[in-house]
Amino acid sequence: MKLRLGLGILAAGGLLAQAQVDTQALMGAQQDNESWLMYGRNYSSWRHSPLDEINTENVNRIVPAWIFQSNQNGKLQTTPLVRDGVMYVTGPSNHAWALDLKTGRELWQYSEPVPEDLAVCCGKPNRGFAMRGERLYKVNVQATLVALDAKTGDVIWEVAAADYRKGYSNTVAPLIVKDMVIIGIAGAEFGTRDFIDAYDAETGERVWRFWTVPGPGEPGNETWGGDSWKRGGASTWITGSYDADLNLIYWGTGNPGPDLDGAPRPGDNLYSDSMLALDADTGERRWHFQFTPHDVHDWDAVADPVLVDMEVEGTFRKALVQANRNGHFYALDRSTGEFLFARAYTEVNWADGIGPDGRPILIPGREPTDEGTLTCPGMGGGHNWHATTYSPQTGFYYFNSGDGCQIYHGATQDFVEGEYYLGSAMENVTGEPREGSILAVDPSTGDRQWRFALVSPPSSGLLSTGGGLLFAGTMEGYFLALDAASGKPLWRLQTGGPVRAPAITYMFDGRQHIATAAGTSIFVFALPR
């Protein structure tokens, strides 16, 4: 049973007339200061706003404008969308809301039950809507894609991307490209074979599918021993980016299956732990780059691909940068996939750098063993999945990092469809708790500009603004603002719950607002009148 409660989006004279979100609006999202139209703010995934009313001089004066309490258990990881006086929020376990941008009042609520026999590795979060026309698009955790009427929350259509009983699930925020809804999938911890899908935004019909683990006769299948490709994983659970000039969609992939035991899957295991560039119209692969061949440490490469035009060693490049889970920051040429450079940003003891071909120079003996192997970084990375930001104002790229090592133990495990397929286990180092940091680097060199220490591995994504600010959150519940140029802390607020999502900003009613999810609530801040 699906639930939709509320009165629709109301204004003084009835239903609020909303301007349709078309391709032109999405292409110009970076210049739209009154809206937040997609997961990464723009197609390059910058998560930067030029708004500067709230700045380094006055951020210590911001106060809550309103707080919405979702009253739902689970991880609130949403990036809210904002359009025409309404905020659209997704929540865990197939919940979503439309909120009045002035007061936070609920306008409608959507809910769909989660199957009791659903198996997921990491909770049931949802990372946000996509928007096109007068419709909203979201995935449900049982691996379906649903289209909603933005005014009422009514379901227009729902399609299944995969069979959740085989271990598939979904938490990704969709990406609109032209007249298509692009989504990834999760499930590698259950030995699924994963993919990236495109669906017709009007009908829900699937337009194309790219399998992230190639089948027999397809390039890359030879990198999987035997029939291990059938259980190869390579999930796609974080939203990608899009270059309209090149007509390429960029999407990162996750770990191979079994996750931590490489013996059943000899070879490099393409296209796990890779960056993919796909033709937007056909889904055909134009290039790929694999960060961690034959991964045995769960170093997903799903983190957002950020598109930056910059000069590298004296040559102008249309680049793609990513802070990878394996402890290295990478820059690639996004036209060709050419490896430009990589730099370690946290403690790394499994590779002695990255070679000129982009392959890691492995240090022997760092794979999981029966007695346990100390490896740095630990299972969550380095930088994990949390949203990053690029500021054209400072020229810096910002991301967070889990700093520290873990002990990996080897194991073997038979594959059973729909059950965990990990093949190993890990533990923390006694007396050495893992910590975290927020880093600013020069994306053209990978050189660190500053580091802000955290007492635990990071939990939130980041937002940069034209006011010279960087907003972040912590697992301990602090929402904070840093000076984007120096990393100096300027303001913080204890929200009462872990901050697991990135903030957004927008102009409304003549004021700049900052919004973030924290705990089970949405907090919205502004300067006092």
Image (tube, rainbow, N blue to C red):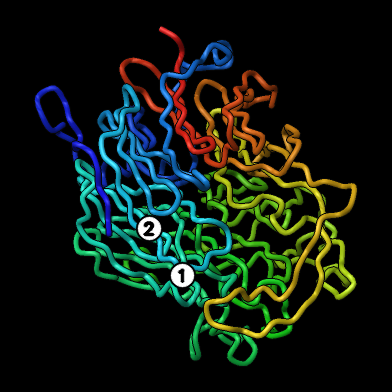
Q: Is residue 426 visible?
A: yes
Q: Is residue 247 visible?
A: no
Badge 1, how many Cα within 10 Å: few under 14, some, many 20+? few
Q: Residue at x 65, y 38 (%)?
A: 475
Which quadrant of the view contains residue 163?
Answer: bottom left
Looking at the image, which is closer to me, 490 or 397?
490
Q: Where does residue 181 sit, x and y in percent of width and height? A: 32, 59
Looking at the image, which is closer to me, 497 or 13?
497
Residue most toward the top?
Answer: 529
Badge 2, how many Cα within 10 Å: few under 14, some, many 20+? many
Amino acid marked by disc 1 = Asp
Q: Quadrant of the C terminus?
A: top left
Label 1 residue SS: loop
Q: Which callout, 2 or 1, points to the residue nearer the camera?
A: 1
Q: Residue at x 49, y 55 (%)?
A: 124
Q: Which residue is mark 2?
A: 139
Looking at the image, which is closer to me, 360 or 406?
406
Which quadrant of the view contains residue 159?
Answer: bottom left
Q: Is residue 444 above or below residue 516?
A: below
Question: Left or right: where does residue 154 sit relative to residue 401?
Answer: left
Q: Which residue is mark 1?
A: 117
